Amino acid sequence: MNKIQSVRELCRKEFKSLEIVDLGNNKIQDVPIALAHYLSNLNLLNLSNNDINTFPSLFGLHKTMKTL
């Protein structure tokens, strides 16, 4: 298991072109709604095996997301 606890660092325009983000096997507890906005080209988001308590429903409307 890794030790990443937050994905807030990805909420920046510099990460707009990311298509795949694999953060499985960490200690992430929440996913900010802004992540869907800043990762607008995202095709795959892997957050398996984390401690997520809340997940924004907005990700269901993400236009490029194929695998969550």
Image (cartoon, rainbow, N blue to C red):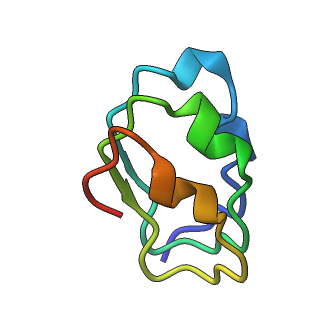
Give the total of numbered labels: 0
Nearer to us in this view, 60 or 46: 60
Residue at figure coordinates x 62%, y 67% from the top left: 3
- Would you place residue 20 above or below residue 5 in this image? above
Residue at figure coordinates x 60%, y 55% from the top left: 58
- Image coordinates of residue 57 in percent, x first then y, are 61, 65
Q: Quadrant of the C terminus?
A: bottom left
- Would you place residue 23 above or below residue 1 in this image? above
- Image coordinates of residue 61 in percent, x first then y, are 48, 51
Toward which corner of the image does residue 52 lie, by quadrant? bottom right
- Would you place residue 7 above or below residue 3 in this image? above
Residue at figure coordinates x 58%, y 43% from the top left: 36
- Image coordinates of residue 60 in percent, x first then y, are 47, 60
- Image coordinates of residue 9 in percent, x first then y, are 71, 38
- Would you place residue 51 above or below residue 47 in this image? below
Toward which corner of the image does residue 43 lie, by quadrant? top left
Residue at figure coordinates x 53%, y 24% from the top left: 15
Instruction: Determine whether, in the image, residue 28 is placed left or right of residue 46.
Output: right
